């Protein structure tokens, strides 16, 4: 009873503020963006400091609703420079909450937090394609779609690649699409025989997510990825990309596809082992070798 | 199994890390690799290479132990009759 009274009085206290907010509709889009951003900043990153499942859930539950708030702003002010910034934030938030959910699963098979199931990714993509597909400012949002899981991003990246008039944006998008699809192909390969991973994707992204990817033809997917990297080297080789160029990164990716794939002869590795003794991969010719690239974590 | 470590960069440090983590397999120290054509994939990454040096399986990330074991067993059975070394 006591808590009910408190709730009622808390509601009453917010009423005048609500009235004030509607009067203050004269706030510019930039001011509204700043207000949402300020509120968002106070909760962002909370999931990284979380140590228990409950902490993680609380942090993600606080963070998740901001994706929709940013999308709302972008929807309301499509012609204002804040629109793309807001969409980028929405993308970033969905990415953070998705990663937090997957990490929670990977750490202790816990389904806390259960991920964000609102329609922000779909709305983000619809607005990007409706209002900004020709923009020269798409780089940052494309960058956030690159390593994301959501299926909505694939057609979005493809359409930007097809329609955007700016060569540098197309170059980044070409790389982003190839890397996005490459990640999904790796995910498919890893999920073979790992039903617990399938459960994780089901909890975080819904039951159709992995089955839908699994219906894709893996060979075709691999070919498409290769041709995107090829296109990146040919058409966008000189476009700046992560401290280097699209061409440099795409060439490395193509090298891996062509030489470090199943069916290829493994390049030799010549070096020293932990004792400083010379070691060659080819020393083990004639035997079956499990080669494990590892790091301390 | 052969490892390639791609994190420890101080000479001599790798051995210490490996003892600490009870890692018993031989491992390249990536700083000491003369020919870095492998691009150093994100870790963990697993490759299964057969007796003639062909890559037969590849996982970037952590596959199920069962997938790795099954793949290894199958390959070893396939290879064993034709090789002397095990």
Image: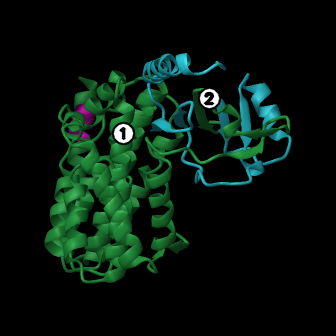
Residue A36 visible somewhere in the drawing: no
Magenta-highlighted residues: A5-9
Mark 2 packing: few (<14 Cα in 10 Å), some, or many (20+)? Answer: some
Q: Is residue A3 left or right of residue A100?
A: left
Quarter in which the N terminus of chain A is drawn:
top left
Q: In this view, does A269 lie to the left or right of A72?
A: right
Query: Marks 1 and 2, Cα distance to the nearest angstrom?
Result: 31 Å
Element under disc 2? loop
- Name which residue lies at 45% across and 46% down: A261
Question: What residue would you read off at disc 2?
Answer: A286
Q: Which of marks 1 and 2 is nearer the N terminus?
A: 1
Q: Mark 1 lies on which chain?
A: A
Q: For the stretch drawn in magenta, what is the main secondary structure?
A: helix
Compared to residue A80, the image places residue A59 above or below, namely above
Where is residue A57 shown, x and y percent of the image?
38, 33
Compared to residue B21, the image places residue B5 above or below, namely below
- Name which residue lies at 52% across and 22% down: B79
Question: What residue would you read off at disc 1?
Answer: A187
Residue A150 or B79: which is nearer the viewer?
B79
Q: Does the magenta stretch include residue A237?
A: no
Tell me, by letter, which chain the rendering colours green: A
- Name which residue lies at 59% across and 48% down: A267
Mark 1 packing: few (<14 Cα in 10 Å), some, or many (20+)? Answer: many
């Amino acid at each position: 009873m006591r808590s009910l009274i408190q709730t009622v009085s808390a509601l009453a206290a917010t009423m005048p503020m609500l009235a004030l907010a509607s009067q203050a509709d004269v706030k510019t889009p930039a001011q509204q963006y700043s207000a949402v951003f300020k509120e968002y900043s106070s909760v962002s990153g909370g999931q990284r400091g979380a140590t228990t499942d409950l902490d993680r859930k609380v942090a993600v539950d606080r963070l998740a609703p901001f994706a929709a708030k940013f999308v709302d702003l972008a929807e309301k002010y499509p012609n204002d420079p804040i629109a793309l910034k807001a969409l980028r934030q929405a993308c970033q938030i969905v990415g953070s909450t998705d990663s937090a959910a997957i990490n929670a699963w990977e750490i202790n098979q816990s389904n806390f937090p259960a991920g964000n199931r609102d329609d922000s990714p779909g709305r983000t993509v619809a607005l990007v394609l409706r209002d900004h597909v020709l923009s020269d400012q798409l780089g940052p949002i494309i960058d956030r779609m690159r390593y994301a899981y959501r299926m909505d991003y694939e057609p979005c990246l493809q359409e930007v690649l097809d329609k955007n008039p700016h060569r540098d944006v197309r170059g980044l998008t070409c790389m982003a699409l190839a890397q996005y699809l490459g990640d999904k192909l790796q995910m498919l390969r890893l999920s073979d025989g790992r039903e617990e991973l399938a459960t994780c994707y089901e909890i975080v992204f819904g039951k159709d997510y992995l089955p839908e990817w699994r219906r894709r033809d893996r060979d075709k997917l691999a070919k498409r990825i290769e041709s995107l990297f090829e296109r990146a080297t040919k058409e966008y080789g000189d476009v700046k990309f992560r401290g280097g160029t699209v061409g440099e990164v795409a060439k490395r990716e193509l090298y891996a596809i062509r030489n470090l794939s199943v069916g290829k002869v493994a390049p030799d590795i010549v070096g020293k082992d932990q004792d400083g003794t010379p070691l060659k991969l080819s020393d083990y010719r004639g035997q079956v070798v499990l080669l494990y690239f590892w790091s301390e974590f | 199994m052969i490892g390639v470590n791609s994190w420890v960069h101080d000479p001599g440090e790798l051995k210490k890390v490996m003892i600490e983590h009870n890692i018993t397999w031989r491992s390249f120290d990536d700083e000491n690799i003369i020919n870095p054509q492998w691009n150093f994939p994100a870790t963990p990454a697993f490759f299964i290479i057969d007796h003639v040096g062909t890559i037969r399986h590849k996982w970037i990330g952590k596959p199920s132990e069962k997938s790795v074991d099954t793949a290894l067993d199958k390959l070893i059975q396939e290879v064993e009759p034709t090789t002397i070394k095990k």
